[in-house]
């Protein structure tokens, strides 16, 4: 089994915000593969899909972004999922809008959810797929920006980014992180 985690914040207030792009991707992935077994557990919402014969547990932590590590750790340990079978999907305000970046390891890069996951797992050796949400315009603080919704002009690019992210996840399942990095980091 592989574990795909989409990061975000729970609740209607945060639906459709830049910070919730991980939730959006996992939700679309669940729809595409007609997810089953939806449950509230591991301080999150889980569902299962099968991609090319590989069972995937989808997880969206309900701990709020900055405490996502507790949920990821609980699911990983319960299923004894090896680090190489863990993928975190999250937003990145250091990337241009809709740009993807896959990594097999590395720092949190200022992303508080990733920071908590690294701290709780005790390692930064796990795949992460970041989706660019752009940078705050002049006069905006980064917290206000990440909690804002995409503009009407940005939505088409983000819809394409979500579709490409799903393709990247499917590639990661089939071929692994290195192949995915080669294909989607351009």
Image (spheres, rainbow, N blue to C red):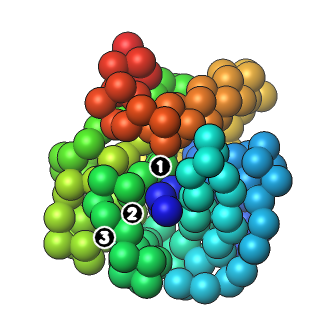
Disc 1 to disc 3, C-alpha distance: 13 Å
The image quarter in which residue 130 lies: top left
Q: What residue is shown with label 1?
A: 90
Q: At 39% across and 57% down in the image, what residue appears?
A: 86
Could you say where residue 178 lies in the image, as x and y percent from the top left? 29, 30
Spatial CA span between label 2 and label 1: 8 Å
> Image point 55% across, 84% down: which residue?
43
* Secondary structure found at label 2: helix
Residue 183: x %, y % from top left:
41, 18
Count how many numbered circles sit on residues in the image. 3
Circles 1 and 3: CB atoms closer than 8 Å: no
Residue at 62% across, 48% down:
53
The disc at residue 116 is 3
Q: Residues within 10 Å of mark 2 (few under 14, many from 20)?
A: many
Residue tagged 2: 113
**Are circles 2 and 3 on residues that touch, CB within 8 Å?**
yes
CA gap, disc 2 to disc 3?
5 Å
The C terminus lies in quadrant: top left
């Amino acid at each position: 089994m592989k574990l795909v985690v989409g990061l975000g914040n729970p609740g209607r207030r945060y639906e459709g915000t830049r910070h919730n792009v991980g939730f959006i991707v996992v939700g679309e992935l669940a729809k595409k593969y007609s997810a089953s077994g939806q449950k509230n557990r591991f301080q999150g919402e889980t569902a299962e899909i099968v991609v090319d014969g590989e069972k995937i547990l989808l997880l969206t932590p309900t701990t709020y972004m900055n405490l996502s590590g507790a949920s990821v750790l609980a699911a990983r340990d319960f299923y004894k999922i090896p680090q190489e079978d863990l993928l975190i999907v999250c937003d990145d305000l250091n990337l241009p809008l809709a740009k993807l970046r896959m990594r097999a390891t590395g720092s949190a890069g200022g992303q508080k959810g990733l920071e908590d996951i690294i701290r709780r797992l005790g390692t930064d050796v796990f795949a992460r797929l970041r989706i660019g949400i752009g940078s705050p315009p002049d006069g905006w603080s980064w917290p206000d920006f990440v909690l804002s919704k995409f503009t009407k002009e940005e939505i088409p690019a983000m819809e394409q980014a979500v579709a490409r992210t799903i393709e990247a996840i499917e590639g990661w399942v089939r071929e692994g992180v290195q192949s995915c990095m080669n294909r989607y980091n351009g």
